[in-house]
């Protein structure tokens, strides 16, 4: 491999790692700032949930369409425009005058985030040979956990001493850096599918389905919520049938039907994020509203889980190159269940040390699940499907986050209603949190079985099995040779 080739790979690694740091940093920093945002913009528990949910919903709606566009027109250009949209929307968030404006700006930010999510992993996978992917995916995922680690710390400090708007200013500056490096140093990529059409009808069906389901959750237990959720499910069913018949589908469902490893790896990711996303959201509110910690103190406490993740993820990535991802990821999911169960018993008298213990357990579980699962998912498909596979995996993550927030919004709507989280309503908040953690623990138990069900990826000599079935048809290629020897 030449020096020039090494430099090209390093530039791709640099921008994808920075972008992998950017969004989790922002999300974890904003979680610490939520009580301050609620106070300044007069938000109740349900409207405060939309600060996170609007970003997730917009990203989930646009992720797969953006992954498809990236495969047709090139991943670099979609990544670049995504970074630009994310940066501009971050600047809008710094200026927000009302809660509605903030929620709308976060939705725009979600679209930019989707363009980054749907291309980043695919760009990285394409830049490195199969035998090195686990190591560099480990570096990339470590950046996610570094963002999660320092996000609460910096977010808490900034919120306490400068104001929560400066969090968005910092993300905008980082976005400018990513745009400059990508535009100046990352080479254009050649698309293999420039002549294939884009499925607009499928994109509309998919968008309506996700929006109706998610918004319906926020309106429960009202009767109109049932209509929206039912309509969303109907649109989702129509989307599935439309995709199976379309010659150039938005989402290759055959990847799920014909590829067991890919299907169950994505299912495991969906369950994992469904069970874990709201942990930081709830604990931030708990630490500041129930334990009366300052934003900075709450941020320092919330560092525990992502710090452990950042330390262990590279090791987990190397393990997944040598041993069965199904075993490593399933152990990680089991540890996560243990951490969630402990959180069911949170109350007003719970010590901070107990919270830290739960966060460390969750950090270990996350680390042993995430990297092996990503490695298994991306290695299960051939190169032409990297964009779709990357977007699909990211969609599972965001749909899991949507489900997690949907459960939270439903419980808040039933128990807290329109009441703000305060000293007067802390018993209702604790009741809500305990019920949410109980539901999430049950969901996460199902993820262990999904992870185990994916089957083995390594053959007895230590390499990967040679064949994975992929979709036939205009864009399909029958089987693909994935003989990765170590």
Image (spheres, helix red, strand yellow):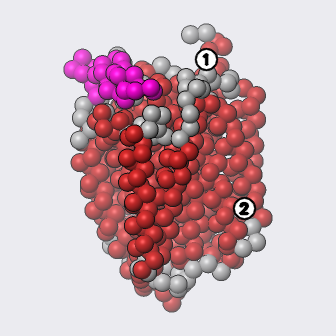
Q: Position of residue 377 (x, y in %)?
A: 39, 35
Residue that sits furthest to the bottom in the current view: 424
Residue 313 shows which numbered tag?
A: none
Q: Which residue is mark 2?
A: 93
Eyeballing the image, is 253 above or below 318?
below
Res 6 label: 1
**Residue 351, horizontal then vertical, whole percent:** 41, 72
Q: Earlier in the sequence, mark 1 or mark 2?
A: 1
Residue 352 is one of the magenta-drawn residues: no
Q: Nearer the viewer, residue 65 or 108?
A: 65
Mark 1, Cα crowd under 10 Å, few <14 / some 14-19 / many 20+, is few
Residue 104: percent from left, percent from top: 66, 64
In the image, is 5 to the left or to the right of 289? right
Q: Main secondary structure of the magenta part?
A: loop
- Check the image and report above or below for 102 versus 78: below
Left or right of 401 in this view: 72: right
Which span of residues is magenta-colored? 457-483
């Amino acid at each position: 491999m030449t020096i020039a080739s090494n430099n090209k790979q390093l530039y791709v690694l640099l921008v994808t790692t920075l972008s992998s740091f950017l969004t989790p940093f922002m999300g974890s920093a904003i979680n610490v700032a939520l009580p301050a945002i609620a106070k300044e913009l007069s938000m109740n528990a349900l409207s405060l949930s939309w600060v996170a949910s609007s970003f997730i919903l917009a990203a989930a709606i646009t992720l797969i369409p953006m992954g498809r566009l990236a495969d047709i027109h090139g991943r670099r250009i979609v990544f670049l425009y995504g970074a630009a949209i994310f940066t501009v929307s971050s600047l809008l968030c710094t200026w927000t005058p009302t809660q509605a404006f903030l929620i709308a700006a976060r939705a725009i930010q979600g679209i930019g985030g989707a363009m980054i999510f749907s291309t980043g992993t695919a760009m990285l996978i394409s830049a490195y040979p199969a035998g090195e992917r686990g190591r560099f995916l480990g570096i990339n995922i470590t950046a996610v956990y570094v963002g999660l680690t320092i996000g609460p710390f910096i977010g808490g400090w900034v919120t306490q001493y400068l104001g929560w708007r400066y969090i968005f200013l910092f993300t905008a500056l980082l976005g400018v850096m990513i745009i400059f490096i990508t535009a100046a140093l990352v080479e254009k990529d050649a698309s293999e599918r420039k002549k294939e059409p884009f499925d607009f009808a499928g994109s509309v069906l998919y968008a309506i389905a996700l929006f109706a389901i998610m918004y319906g959750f926020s309106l429960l237990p009202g009767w109109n919520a049932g209509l929206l959720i039912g309509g969303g499910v109907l649109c989702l069913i129509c989307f599935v049938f439309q995709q199976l018949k379309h010659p150039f589908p938005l989402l290759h469902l055959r990847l799920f039907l014909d590829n067991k490893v890919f299907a169950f790896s994505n299912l495991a990711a969906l369950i994992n994020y469904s069970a874990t996303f709201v942990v930081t959201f709830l604990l931030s509110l708990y630490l500041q509203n129930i334990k009366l910690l300052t934003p900075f103190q709450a941020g320092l406490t919330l560092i525990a889980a992502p710090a452990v993740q950042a330390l262990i993820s590279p090791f987990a990535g190397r393990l997944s190159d040598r041993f069965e991802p199904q075993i490593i990821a399933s152990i990680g999911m089991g540890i996560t269940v243990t951490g969630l169960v402990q959180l069911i018993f949170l109350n007003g008298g719970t010590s901070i040390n107990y919270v830290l213990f739960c966060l460390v357990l969750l950090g270990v579980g996350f680390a042993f699940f995430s990297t092996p699962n990503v490695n298994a998912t991306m290695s299960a498909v051939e190169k032409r499907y990297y964009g779709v596979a990357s977007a699909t995996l990211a969609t599972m993550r965001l749909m899991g986050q949507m489900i997690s927030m949907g459960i939270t919004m439903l419980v808040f709507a039933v128990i807290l209603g329109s009441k703000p989280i305060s000293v007067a309503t802390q018993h209702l908040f604790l009741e809500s949190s305990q019920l949410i953690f109980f539901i999430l623990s049950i969901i996460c138990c199902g993820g262990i079985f999904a992870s185990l069900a994916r089957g083995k990826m390594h053959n007895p000599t230590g390499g990967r099995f040679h064949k994975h079935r992929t979709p036939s048809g205009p864009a399909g290629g029958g089987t693909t040779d994935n003989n990765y020897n170590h």
